[in-house]
Image: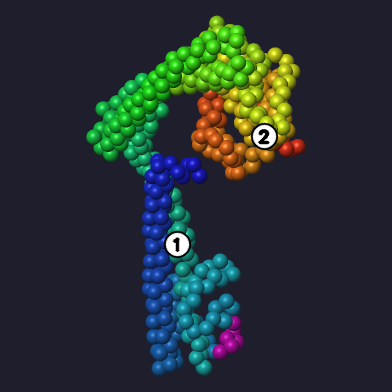
Amino acid sequence: MQFRRRLRSRIVLSFLIFGTLLSALFALSTLFLQNYLEDQLIGATLQEELDDYVNQLKSDPSVVEPFYSRIQGYVTRPGDPNQTVDAAVRGLATGVHDVRLDSGMVIKAAVRKEDDLWAFLLYDISDNHRLKQQLLWALIGAVLLFSALSFTLGAWSSLRVMKPVTDLADRLQAAGDEGVPERIADDFADDEVGELAKALDSYAHRLHHMVERDREFNADVSHELRSPLTVITGATELLLAQPDLDEKIRTRLLRIARAARQSADITTALLHMVRAEQGIDKDSTAHNVGDIVNDVVHLYEPLIGGKPLKLQVVEEDRVSVIAPESVVAVTVGNLIGNAMRYTPEGEVTITIGSGQVTIEDTGPGIPEEDIDHVFDRHYRGQNISGKGAGLGLAIVKRLCELYGWSIRFANREEGGLRAELLFFGGD
């Protein structure tokens, strides 16, 4: 079906179908006209000769039977006691008929049967039949020849017609993702394809400026947010350093410090994502995922509140990742935060090992029809309450694509949801 959807294929098929139908129609018309004229001419001649001979015979019984090189005439009585006429002809009714004899001869027989006599006039059309077969094969050959010519012409024409379009597609595919897009309209003629190239140039430049503007804005916002977050972090650290600080105030200051760190991590991760850069090189150090997960769990513990919810971390073996610590924290933090937010009771278990982090909860899970949409921006599943803009998992997906990680969700048989973040060997 893909072949039929290509424009060039449509042009070739159109030429092929048109040429074949046209030549086939011509061949059929030729055969029909030949058969019609033959039947009319020979049949009318035989019928006229037979009627004339019978009338002569009635007026003068001594008139002998006509004799021609290819025409034979017979006059007999009903029943044909002498069996002079071939049985295949003798049983025919009055009229003109085409008959193939046992000898292989093809004849056209004019028959006239009256009460007192039967008259037959036979015309050998074997040569006509043989020529008709040859004409039929010749016309079939002509149809095939015209079809081949039509296909060749269609292929050549489509190649010429589609070449500018193919060149335009190649130029678009070769265009780079970065930098100002090059103008391509200058390389095409001032025709329909040239107009399309101009429209694509205009669209590409508008899209480039819009993307650059948004990228610069997001980068500036992410960068500018770091300054107030640094001030908040520094102020809370100074306040926490006071020895006579009230315990309630200390708890609130710790929450502020954790929220500031979380915001700083998100800001740093978004800055890498906006710039589409990993922020790592071959000399970057590897971070222990277990330490990052424990810090994130400590940060999210206040979300438990008064819920009968148990939060535990199981580190089966060490997992190290070369990536900014803030990116790992944001990615894991979104998954842990969602599990805690949508699990009213039970437990949330974070398992670290085998190059991945697995978060399992005892919440309601996700309907199977919604699992494929969890990464969509602003998407919230059915019967999901609470605050949130539906951007957390969309950000996680972007970060995973940037660093080559893999993430997948599945409902647990015993209830709840399993989220797997694979740092190595993901598909």
Crowd rating for badge 2 (residues with CA inside 10 Å; few <14, some 14–19, many 20+): many
Q: Is residue 91 above or below residue 30?
A: below
Q: Which residue is mark 1?
A: 132
Q: Nearer the viewer, mark 1 or mark 2?
A: 2
In the figure, 105 relative to 385: above or below? below
Q: How many numbered marks does the figure carry?
A: 2
Return the disc, 1 or 2, that comes first in the chain's sequence.
1
Residue 125 drawn at (x, y percent): 46, 68
Rendered residue at 27%/36% (across/down): 195
Residue 41 image point, x, y percent? 38, 73
From the image, tell me which residue sits under label 2.
Answer: 343
At numbered mark 1, what does the secondary structure look like: helix, strand or loop?
helix
The stretch drawn in magenta includes residue 4: no
Residue 166: x percent and y percent? 37, 33
Residue drawn at the location 47% of the way across and 70% of the way down: 124
Magenta region:
78-84
Coloration of the structure image? rainbow
What amino acid type should be assigned to the residue bearing mark 2?
Answer: Thr
Name the one closer to the observer, 95 or 350. 350
Task: Name the spot of residue 244 as percent of width and height, x first.
Answer: 60, 10
Q: Residue at x 55, y 20 (%)?
A: 256
Question: Mark 1 belongs to which amino acid?
Answer: Lys
Camera sees residue 405:
no
